[in-house]
Image: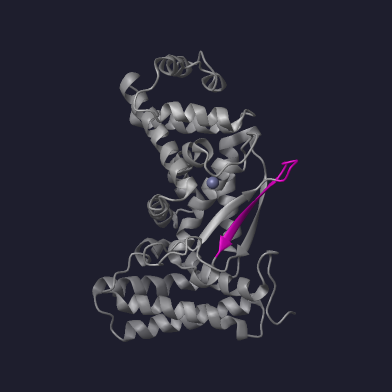
Amino acid sequence: MSPVGTSPYAGLEPIMWRSLLARAAVFHAVRASLARLTDVTDQMQAVQLVLLELDLLARNLSALDCDDATAVATVVRDWKQVIVETIAGKPAGPEERTLLLELQDRIQSANVEDPFKGLFESVQAQAGALYGPSWRPSRLSVAHTLSHPRNADLKIDPYAVTAVTHLPPNAQAAEVELRIFCDKFGPAAYAAVPMLLAHEFVCHVPARQDKVKNDSDFAEGFLDWAAHYFLDRWAGKIDPQLAPAARRHADRLKGVLERRPDAPEVHARAMGHLAADNLVAWLEGDLELSPEESEARVARLAVQLNVLDRPLDLKDRFVGFLSCADLPPQMQEALRSWVADSVKAEQLLEVDVR
Ligand SMILES: [Zn+2]
């Protein structure tokens, strides 16, 4: 047996994987408490210290000569002891004490199973059902990065993880890669993984357009709006215990990404979301559809357009019309026919707007 265990991912050395797995196994075990754990304030110093101790325990694993299961069990045992001692030391307030007791209880269920694989399969099952016959199967890879994806202050942007989809030329199967800055991988980053996967699965894995552009209003914006829509609906099915934290950090990650005005994908995201919001409002106002039906129709439309083998420029052009304050009359006419089922989604891309 290897003294440092094994890594299931080519992009991660066994020592790095072990340290990441230990953290993720703990976050998975306490996932029902993650929404509160990621909101601890400076007043909750005992909880903050407990999290720092977890970080130290995970880092020190590389010195252990054992397999991964033993390594994870060791971190869990030692972290539980830290929690027990912290509770005995009388934390500041009843809320903090309750949270620590929750952690002490929930950590018992920690195990060595790969929680990234579990999340990946759960989100993929939802996206596969959404896209149906157009779904393109994909596999997960996990890689280590040497820095935070945005080199940000963790207090403002704790999401030390990002994701990217690789589509091979024949494109029968895709690869979704989680890129993790392992040393700074904390509970908020773990809670954001479902949203990151939803983005890759809704926007990129089944995409059929001719090219990939990270500044595409359609691919990075309009579809990202749909990814958020679906993540909100899927969260309870992906993992009911993680759902509150997954929803909260999907929203916060969106806020963090919006605050980077210089990045090309940020503008695309803003324009695509605006286009989707405009279309929802138009369906509510012009066709008097309910907010729920309007949102559902826009999300569906994004999915239908994504699997059309048409040029990305044409899809971006369509999103461009929607992002105007006033929808062109020809487009309004086409959209009314689309809602009435007399025009297909594909024809919306061809509307002659003068
Ligand atoms: Zn993307």
Q: Image quadrant of residue 128?
A: top right
- x 62%, y 55%: residue: 177
Where is residue 40 shown, x and y percent of the image?
A: 32, 68
Q: Image quadrant of residue 3?
A: bottom right
Whether residue 178 is in magenta: the answer is yes
Where is residue 268 shown, x and y percent of the image?
A: 47, 41
Asked whether, in this view, residue 34 is left or right of residue 201, the answer is left
Where is residue 170 shown, x and y percent of the image?
A: 75, 41
- x 49%, y 26%: residue: 318
In this rendered view, identify the residue nearer to me: 329 or 207. 329
In this view, which residue lies farthest toward the left?
93
- x 54%, y 33%: residue: 303
Could you tell me if residue 111 is visible in this image?
Answer: no
- Residue 311, relative to residue 38: is it above or below? above
- x 64%, y 34%: residue: 208
Could you tell me if residue 119 is visible in this image?
Answer: yes
Which quarter of the figure is the C terminus placed in? top left
Asked whether, in this view, residue 316 is left or right of residue 209, the answer is left
Looking at the rendering, the stretch of residues picked out in magenta corresponds to 168-180
- Residue 254, relative to residue 97: is it above or below? above
Which quarter of the figure is the N terminus placed in? bottom right
Whether residue 101 is in magenta: the answer is no
Colour scheme shown: one colour
Q: What count of labels does the image hold? A: 0
Where is residue 186 shown, x and y percent of the image?
A: 46, 68
